Image (tube, helix red, strand yellow):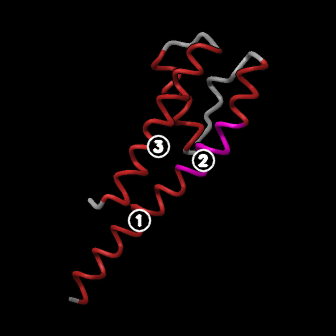
Amino acid sequence: MPKRIIIPISIFIALLFLGAFAYSKVEGWNYMDSIYFTTITATTIGYGDLVPKTNLGKIFTMGFSFLGIAMAFYLFSLVAKYVFRKKFENKIG
């Protein structure tokens, strides 16, 4: 996998773990719930089973949502571009 995909994957994973750390401190959630919530939020699934209760947690979620969703879609588009480019190169070449 090329470097231009590995770096965004690393940044996205770091973002999830930093978000999880913040939620565990601000909301008092265990680390697994925090990782789960950041992943569900960043991928726009949003089950609604966990929600921030504190004002600081709600404010953090507003910022994290914009950053996490943007990063997730950027990453998904890079991976899709890489996969489809390889697929079409193999058919053409």
Against 82, residue 75 (above or below) is above
Q: Residue sitting at 64 percent across and 36 percent down?
A: 64
- Reply yes or no: does residue 34 show up in magenta: no
Between 91 and 68, the residue placed more toward the observer is 68
Residue drawn at point x = 54 percent, y = 50 percent: 71
Answer few, some or many: residues within 10 Å of disc 3's Cα (few below 14, many 20 plus, some between 14 and 19).
many
**Residue lying furthest top in this view?**
28
Q: In the displayed structure, does residue 59 sit left or right of residue 24? A: right
Estimate the x, y position of residue 3 in percent, counting from the top left.
32, 58
Asked if disc 3 and disc 2 are in contact, CB closer than 8 Å, the reply is no
Disc 3 is placed on an element classified as: helix
Q: Which residues make up the magenta segment?
A: 63-71
Could you say where residue 14 lies in the image, as x and y percent from the top left? 45, 36
Q: Which residue is drawn at the image coordinates 39% and 61% (left, top)?
A: 79
Q: Mark 1 belongs to which amino acid? A: Ala
Is 67 one of the magenta-colored residues? Answer: yes
User: Above or below — where is 26 with respect to 68?
Assistant: above
The spot of residue 17 in percent (x, y) is 47, 29
86 lies above or below 6: below
Task: Kindly report the secondary structure that dominates the magenta region of the rendered protein.
Answer: helix
Identify the residue under disc 2: 69
Residue beneath label 3, please? 12
Q: Amino acid at mark 3?
A: Phe
- Judged from the image, the secondary structure of the residue bearing numbered disc 1 is helix
Percent x, y of residue 2: 29, 61
Find disc 1 in the rendering and name its residue: 80
Question: Which mark sits nearer the N-terminus, 3 or 2?
Answer: 3
Q: Earlier in the sequence, mark 2 or mark 1?
A: 2
Label 2 to label 1, Cα distance in Å? Answer: 16 Å
> How dense is the environment of label 2, judged by Cα within 10 Å: few (below 14), some, or many (20 and up)?
some
Label 3 – label 2 distance at C-alpha: 10 Å
